[in-house]
Image (spheres, helix red, strand yellow):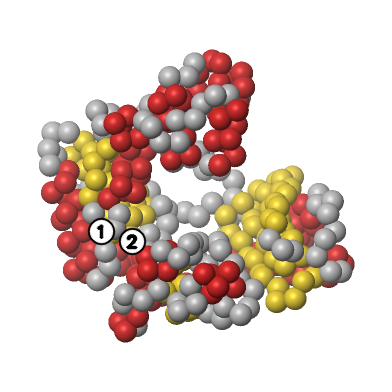
Amino acid sequence: MARWVLHVDLDQFIAAVEVLRRPELRGRPVIVGGDGDPTKRGVVSTASYEARKYGVHSGLPLRTAARRCPDAVFLPVDREAYEAASSAVMATLREFDAVVETLGWDEAFLAVDGDDPEAAAREIQRRVRASTNLDCSVGIGQNKLQAKLATGFGKPAGVFRLSGETWFEVLGDLSTDALWGIGAKTAKRLAKLGIDTVTQLAAADPHALAAQLGPTTGPWLVRLARGQDHSAVVGTPYVARSRGREITYQHDLDDWEQVRSEVMRLARLVADDVAAEQRPTARVVVKVRYTPFNTHTHGHSLATPTTEVTAIERGALAALDQFTGRRPVRLLGVRAEFPAAG
């Protein structure tokens, strides 16, 4: 029997959970973000498919979302509800005779043996819907990369298979940022080298790209474009690689002494979080979003991993000191990163 990788992705997960709690919202544009007040500063956490038709997407300022979709229903973020729904879905997936690797609230990989992966995918959809009333899309591939990309072609609530035989037929003419792991910046760097499509990247010389983009990154990008991925589906429990806090201010912070005080306050909250988990912090990252919406981050590695609040606070301040701009600030964030496993 063949071994397949299935990527399960819950459709419009957060919005779907909210619609389950408020059935009267089904079919209406729903936007979840902040405290649900679009007149305040904040960003969209998720939007229903109906809202996405108006150009609303995750990370968009709530005020912009309200202008684009004035008839939308805005709701506050409710993490506990989403965590509970996610737990129910993952419990259902673990009932299958498969290795299950969770990727967060709304995604998981399953390693499945058999000659009919579509039947397995449809059974997953059936059971998830029966147990949670949530819909999911399932991508099928010979590896995790193929399965992850296949899911996008199956949305919403569909099944799609992507294999080595169909890879270039489906993806070959698409831009390089269609690949999982390639963002806009990398795509621009590749374009400057005359590489615009997946096919062109797959045909590139790994050694030449290594000279341009680094000895690890260059060859990895070529393997990516060829649909190659040797990473295994692992059944170890999902563990977050960081913990963070952030806040959007309703009025700009013009005084950088106040910015400094707020970073210290956020760092202490983060330190409390990591101490409660007993997971030492190796690096502290500070995020600053200037007015109107320019975001920058800087990090500082700690001498030794620790849960000690003073060390985490000092790390946050050291990261903040790397910011040279002293413009008005609308958002601050502090993130503690844990040491890499192994």
Q: Position of residue 192 (x, y in %)?
A: 60, 28
Q: Quadrant of residue 320?
A: bottom right
The residue at 13%/49% (across/down) is: 119
Q: Is residue 83 visible?
A: no
Tell which of 320 and 200 is nearer to you.
Answer: 200
Q: Is residue 268 above or below residue 161?
A: below
The residue at 56%/63% (across/down) is: 60
Upstream in the sequence, badge 2 or badge 1?
A: 2
Q: Quadrant of residue 147?
A: top left
Q: Amino acid at mark 1?
A: Ala
Real-space Cα distance between discs 2 and 1? 7 Å
Q: Residues within 10 Å of mark 2 (few under 14, many from 20)?
A: many
Question: Which disc number belongs to residue 11?
Answer: 2
Q: Considering the numbered disc 2 on the image, is that residue within a helix, a strand or a loop?
A: loop
Q: Is residue 212 above or below residue 240?
A: above
Q: Position of residue 96 (x, y in %)?
A: 20, 53
Count of labels in the image? 2
